[in-house]
Image: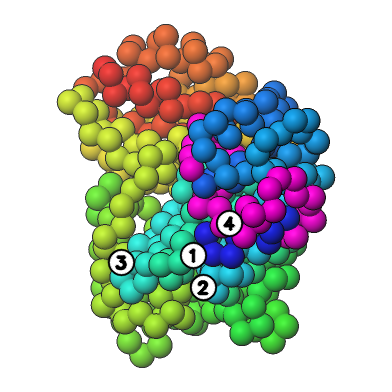
Amino acid sequence: MKNLTLENLTKVCGGVYFGPSDKLEQEVSSITTDSRKAEAGTLFVPIVGERVDAHKFIPQVMEAGALATLSERILENADFPYIKVESSLQAVKDIAEFYLQQLQIPVVGITGSVGKTSTKEVIASVLKEKYRTLKTQGNFNNELGLPLTVFRLRDEDEIAVLEMGISDFGEMTRLAKIARPDTCVITNIGTCHLENLGDRDGVLKAKTEIFKYLKKDGHIVLNGDDDKLCTVKEYEGIKPVFFGMESDKDIYADEIVSRGLKGMTCRIHVGEESFTTDIPMPGRHMVYNALAATAVGRIYGLTLEQIRHGIETLEAISGRFHMIETDRFLIVDDCYNANPMSMKASLDVLKDGAGRRVAILGDMGELGENEVQLHAEVGEHAAQCGIDVCICTGPLSANIAKMARKNPELIVIEEPDRDSLLSHLSDYVQTGDTILVKASHFMQFEKVVAALQEM
């Protein structure tokens, strides 16, 4: 890994090196917090968690051939190189910031309340048409996940697409300090993490902290249809590129046609030019994602044909509106996470499904003092959006069920928890159903998806 010698790592961490001096000029070949992934040349970073202190794995990591380890304490009688640091978590952030600066490649930072991951996927799919692109995988978008994503970069990579997720003030500043993005993309300002951020104005303030470490010649790409983001006129002389559904935006879409669960078709306008594209994932929100990707693609010199091909070759990922076709059902696996905006959007897409349209919904977390009302609003939407069955699981989802019952033609079922749902699930679904599965991650609804697949 470029310039990540033990000597440089010690300086970057503000640490103290213990070990043979002839090892100081050696570069580590990988960095991991997972002891099972240690191999020859690895730097191990032991994180002290709520349940496990990873320092206990240091001996086995070094036996596996790791070059060195960090440690928050003195290691008595150690016969291997290690760097004593105050905090492993802070050290891993400092190393990631330094390493990214050594690579000197453009960074696209993506944040927002809803759609960060799907937007990241479309942007990466577009950029890969011209560049060797590395993107965030899974949920590696926080103060530990972002550094681990950075450590996957290698000299041959040409651009990084980094998702950045937060739940409180100050977090985005710390993430932006690591990423130092050349381009900032914000998808929208919604009602996530209100227990810490208060209201949507608080969310806007927290998300726009991403600009604090934006490169001076950088770019800002914003959803101009969002009533909060459209108030951002400039940041230190950098004027945003706005995308949306109206012709007053810098990049906009029209001729929008839903192809049901097969995806969306639209025409995207960029200045005097335009192109028609078939987005292979359903939902109007995917048009916004394609617009964001178009804006980023143009910033980095892609042709409209390259952008179109990148959009149309997008691949779905597990838990993010992933279509699973079994002998009995079409399962829409959207269970990775949920908030009111994304749940309503998913219900709107479900209504285009074949057979009975069944929504299996679970509790949404981190919504603050208005969590009851926000769940009720999802129930009102479910009552009006044209689905056939709504199965509500968890104490908060009882509020979804209550409001969904305003539609007497909608079958509404309540379950107290996931285990109860699983025990009765076969009674609720029928061959030919299209089934949406969605809840916040803590509900572990991937078990519901697995159970449906086995039926």
Secondary structure of the residue carrying tag 3 is helix
Image depth: mark 2 or mark 1 in front: 2
Q: Are marks 2 and 1 in contact (CB under 8 Å)?
A: yes
Q: Percent from the top left, x then y, of residue 72?
A: 78, 39
In the picture of the structure, the residue carrying the numbered disc 2 is 105
Image depth: mark 1 or mark 4 in front: 4
Mark 3 or 2 closer to N-term?
2
The picture quadrant where one finds residue 180 is: bottom right
Image depth: mark 2 or mark 4 in front: 4
Mark 3 or 4 closer to N-term?
4
Mark 1 or 3 closer to N-term?
1
Which amino acid type is shown beneath numbered disc 4?
Gln
Q: Nearer the viewer, residue 179 or 169?
A: 179
The picture quadrant where one finds residue 123 is: bottom left
Mark 2 or 1 closer to N-term?
2
Image depth: mark 3 or mark 4 in front: 4
In the picture of the structure, the residue carrying the numbered disc 1 is 160
Residue at horizontal 68%, vertical 48%? 20
Residue at horizontal 37%, vertical 71%? 131
Which amino acid type is shown beneath numbered disc 3?
Gly
Q: Is residue 407 shown above or below 309?
A: above
Q: Nearer the viewer, residue 137 or 332?
A: 137
Residue at horizontal 62%, vertical 60%? 25
Crowd class of label 2 (few under 14; some 14 to 19; many from 20; radius 10 Å): some
| Magenta range | 11-40
Mark 1 or 4 closer to N-term?
4
Which residue is the extreme one toward the bottom? 272
Q: Is residue 289 in view from this perspective?
A: no
In the picture of the structure, the residue carrying the numbered disc 4 is 26
Which amino acid type is shown beneath numbered disc 1?
Ala
Q: Is residue 433 shown above or below 288?
A: above
